[in-house]
Image (tube, rainbow, N blue to C red):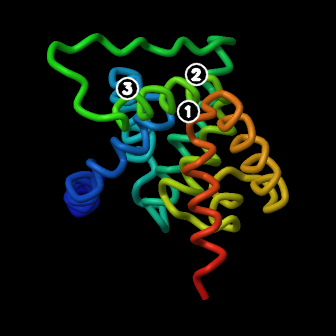
Amino acid sequence: MNSADRREFHEFVSARSPALMRLAYLLTAGDQHAAEDLLQTSLAKTALRWSRVDDPDKYLRQVMYRQQISWWRRRREYAVPELPERPGADTADDVELKIMVQKALGKLTAKQRAVLVLRYFEDQSESTVAATLGCSIGTVRSTAHRALARLLQLCPELHDLYTRSNVTARKEP
């Protein structure tokens, strides 16, 4: 990598690291150490091809997704870390909901989790998610549908939030 590419890569990493770390955290179902490893490995792979990458953000997301799937396949199972108990009073009901959602996300397949993260957390279009994951738009739709149904099954507390957001979305022009 020449000095101009090195500088450009460094600037990209500096600017995008927080968002990429959040994505890695979600893809690893909240395992901070695995997320750090995923991001570091993906950045190293991207650095090797930096001069040939047209859209660095898109390329890095693909590398992260594929790397996570590869690790998941090798393990054959995915251990969800238990959150440590923290001293102090429960601050709100949303803390409990967050923990339940995190555990439920950990029970989804890596592909289902990736579709939900890219589609709803990253707010990407179905066609962008399909391109990132290397599948058809129909696959993204069906996977998102099944993943949301499974998430609602695993965490019934989300049902009211899901229903309210769908009603609100339908009312908007």
Residues marked 1 and 2 touching at CB (< 8 Å): yes
Along the polypeptide, which appears first: circle 3 or circle 2? 3
**Residue at point 64% right, 48% down?**
115
* Mark 2 surroundings: few (<14), some (14-19) or many (≥20) residues within 10 A: some
Kind of residue at badge 3 = Asp
Distance CA(mark 3)–CA(mark 2): 11 Å
- Which residue has dot 1 on it? 67
Q: Nearer the viewer, residue 77 or 64?
A: 77
Q: Nearer the viewer, residue 16 or 56?
A: 16
Label drawn at residue 37: 3
Q: Give percent across and percent down for residue 162.
A: 61, 52
Q: Give percent across and percent down for residue 101.
A: 51, 33
Kind of residue at badge 2 = Trp
Q: Secondary structure at mark 2?
A: helix
Kind of residue at badge 1 = Gln
- Which residue has dot 2 on it? 71
